[in-house]
Amino acid sequence: MLKGIHHSAFRCRDAEETRAFYEDVLGLPLKAALAFEEEPGSGRPHPYVHIFFALPDGNFIAFFDAPDSATEAHFRPAHGFDRHIAFEAGSEAELMEWKAKLDAAGVPCFGPIDHHFVRSIYMWDPNGLQVEITARVPAHDAILDAEAAGARDVLAGWSARTADRKSALKAPAAA
């Protein structure tokens, strides 16, 4: 069985700009900045820096600053369905403190959004990555336990309902 997530990694536009957001605004300490000249595994020349920010649970969020292979398209804000990272606040009161802090820092932020088992606020980092800060509602565990009981049935119904649309997504591209 896997132990957990060590880190999630994303591309960044600028390591210092990213550091300022994650360390100065979100309070995550910079734990490593590793500069390399070659692409891992291939040995091809590809200078980059890999930076890591520590989370209190021992996990990390990491970024690659590799300007020679980056394009502006890498940094367009992505829809939250496509990619986002969710950090957890200790309480709903703390969530609202984060919202006030982000507003004061001039970071555009929306929410809170009620997701039934959590409440969340959202923003984008300097790299176009949607960042969520979420807080569990008091009944979080009970709600998820109740949801778990029917989760496979929900997936089976969803799969049957969407099978035709998904088959088109899985079809090989026309030559």
Image (cartoon, grey):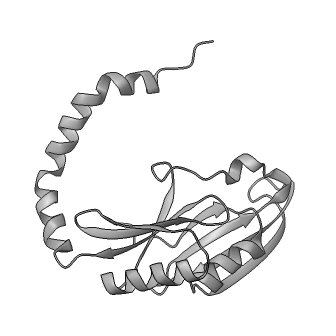
Res. 91 visible in picture: no
Which quarter of the picture shows residue 1? Answer: bottom left
- Seen at 54% across and 79% down, the residue is 102
Res. 105 visible in picture: yes
* Horizontal side, residue 25 vs residue 75: left or right: left
Count of number-bearing discs? 0
- Return the residue found at the far top: 175
* Horizontal side, residue 83 vs residue 150: left or right: right
6 lies above or below 173: below
Percent across and percent down for residue 76 are 66, 50
Seen from the viewer's position, the closer of residues 4 and 9 is 9
Seen from the viewer's position, the closer of residues 171 and 108 is 108
* Horizontal side, residue 76 vs residue 86: left or right: right
* Horizontal side, residue 169 vs residue 92: left or right: right
- Seen at 20% across and 72% down, the residue is 140
Seen from the viewer's position, the closer of residues 121 and 100 is 100
- Seen at 56% across and 19% down, the residue is 173
Percent across and percent down for residue 103 are 54, 78
Which quarter of the picture shows residue 129? Answer: bottom right
Quarter of the image with the C terminus is: top right
40 lies above or below 15: above
Percent across and percent down for residue 169 are 45, 26
- Seen at 31% across and 81% down, the residue is 92
